[in-house]
Image: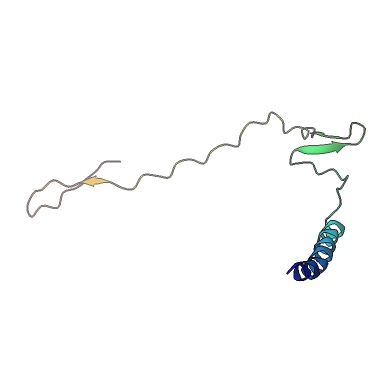
Amino acid sequence: MLLALKKRSTLVVPAAVVALTGGVLAAPAVSNAAECGPGTVFDAAANLCVVAPAPAGQWNAPPPPQAPPPPLPPISICPPIPFVPVCFPVN
């Protein structure tokens, strides 16, 4: 029984070491590249991402005008008078 455990450990331990070593070698290295988010730029002197300067003339621009509302559909009132087609437009 002890001999079987020793044979098994002589196979399992080197396999585990190879697996862990392969994972370390295949793992990506830490990058020093700056990945700034939207609205920011990389400042090399400070080694930081800083807020990007506002475009000229666009900072306090008023919003564009809204489209006019659609016209109302034609509405008519027709009184219930038998045999007389009388209708009055409302709008």
Q: Nearer the viewer, residue 78 or 25?
A: 25
The quarter of the image holding the N terminus is bottom right
Q: Nearer the viewer, residue 26 or 79?
A: 26
Query: Within the image, what quadrant is residue 65 found in?
Result: top right
Q: Nearer the viewer, residue 58 or 72?
A: 58
Residue at far left of view = 82
| Rendered residue at 10%/48% (across/down) | 80
* Residue 76 locus on image (x, y percent): 24, 46
Residue at far right of view = 45
| Rendered residue at 67%/31% (across/down) | 61
Numbered marks: total: 0
The quarter of the image holding the C terminus is top left
* Residue 49 locus on image (x, y percent): 82, 35
* Residue 86 locus on image (x, y percent): 16, 49
Q: Nearer the viewer, residue 42 or 82?
A: 42
Query: Within the image, what quadrant is residue 8 found in?
Result: bottom right
Q: Which of the colour schemes (rainbow, by chain, secondary structure, one colour) is used? A: rainbow
Image position of 50 (left or right of 86): right
| Rendered residue at 86%/52% (across/down) | 29
* Residue 66 locus on image (x, y percent): 53, 38
Image position of 90 (left or right of 46): left
Q: Is residue 34 above or below residue 4?
A: above
